Image (cartoon, rainbow, N blue to C red):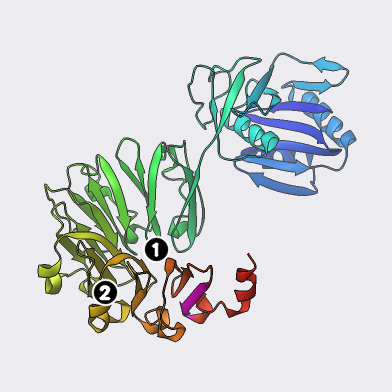
Amino acid sequence: MILCYILLYDCLFLLENDQNIPVLCLRREGISRFREVFSIVARDVNILGGISILVLSSCALCTRVASAAAHKLSNGVCVETQKGTTNTGLNRMLQVYVSFASGRGESVSLPATSTVRDLKILAHNCLRQGFLRLVKGDGSVLPNSIITLLDAGIQDGEHLTVVVQQVKVSASTKAFAVWCYKGDGIVTWGNPSHGGDSSAVQDRLKNVKQIQATCTAFAAILADGSVVAWGDPDYGCDCSAFQDQLRNVREIQAASAAFAAILADGSVITWGCLGADNFANQTRPRQIQATGGAFAAILADGSVVAWGDPNCGGDCSVVQDRLKNVKQIQATCAAFAAILADGSVVTWGSRGFGGKSSVVQDQLRNVQRIQTTGGAFAAILADGSVVSCGDPTKGGNSSAVGELRNVQDVQATSYAFAATLADGSVVTWGDLSRGGDNSDVQDQIQGL
């Protein structure tokens, strides 16, 4: 194997013969400078994190590139072959062993001036496992940062334990955010105006505990209880007016255009299109749920407070006297459903989205849990039956599939439900284009 390491100003290049395919790795900011100096046209370009990979045409070209770099830039070159190693001393090599707790691992070699992030990417490629946390022998965790291995205290021959982190994904309507609990940074992509570009706040997104999203903005709770938001200012990105109050935040919920944060003292701060409809209560809210334009909170005494757009459930005054001993709240796009301690259900909000349940009120007894689509509720009763209400085109009417008995679970898409029965069958109803018809795959389901 031929390895050529070229230190080009602040950019590190790695040439490697992997399965007879020469590979040149350089940091993204070095691509244009590299092309200008060597006028090289690559066969392919792939970008992974902060590293770009250029596949060149031959091993001979790799050698010529290394020689040209050393000659033209006088910044040194380290060439390692099976016959021996030549090192100018400007970029000392470190041998690091990375392994899982099981003992399976790999030994990797890279320049001491490489960053911790470079080491993580190399470990990722060698172990074929992403979202890694590297732990030193003393139990300290290496940050996912651009500090060098030398500055991180990594010694030649160091043994690092690899811990796989659970990856989490949050989404607005046109962008994604990928992160790990208490990880050192996040990755976003998609429409920049919908939160796909987090570069303005990237340096603050450390030790993230939770991320929620409106239609076009994201909000993250950090380990210290502060909040960082990005995306569309009109849809929750701009929380500057409440930044001093957003301390010791323990939970965030999102409507389509606003966020609500529960603080440790029980107060709630709301920002976004719903305006500053905030409330403070010494009895800490047990749960906050959101429709597209409103919030509802269960207080410690079992009562409910709602605020936001009345057409989306922001006004529960009509049913306020019935909202006592509330155990759980679920929401469609524009209505809420509360399960009371006695198993009954109270709904409010837009009639067409499940806010009016009077037609099935007598059937809503001994309700165990509720699942929702964008416009309907499906309640699972203690006897295994299901009662649905709301927009029939969005799953609000299950009569077409007959009486549902022995239901084990119900899941939902935006406009359709799927119920798993005790006999292993799956029954669906709602919008046919959203999963409401599974007739074409019934034989496959039965064959599982």
Residue position for label 1: 215
Nearest to N terminus: mark 1 or mark 2: 1
What's the residue at 30%, 72% (across, down)?
A: 334
Disc 2: which residue: 364
Q: Position of residue 345 (x, y in %)?
A: 23, 70
Q: Amino acid at mark 2?
A: Leu
Q: Is label 1 in a helix, a strand or a loop?
A: loop
Left or right: where 160 falls relative to 379: right
Q: Residues within 10 Å of mark 2 (few under 14, many from 20)?
A: many
Answer left or right for 156 relative to 67: left
The stretch of residues the image draws in magenta is 426-431
Decide: is 175 above or below 168: below
Q: In the image, 159: left or right of 255?
A: right
- State yes or no: residue 90 in magenta: no
Taking depth in this image into account, of 196 and 169 the one nearest to the observer is: 169
Q: Residue 303 at x, y = what percent?
A: 14, 59
- Contact, mark 1 vs mark 2 (Cβ under 8 Å): no
Q: Quick one: 16 or 105, which is closer to the camera?
A: 105
Q: Position of residue 413 (x, y in %)?
A: 46, 69
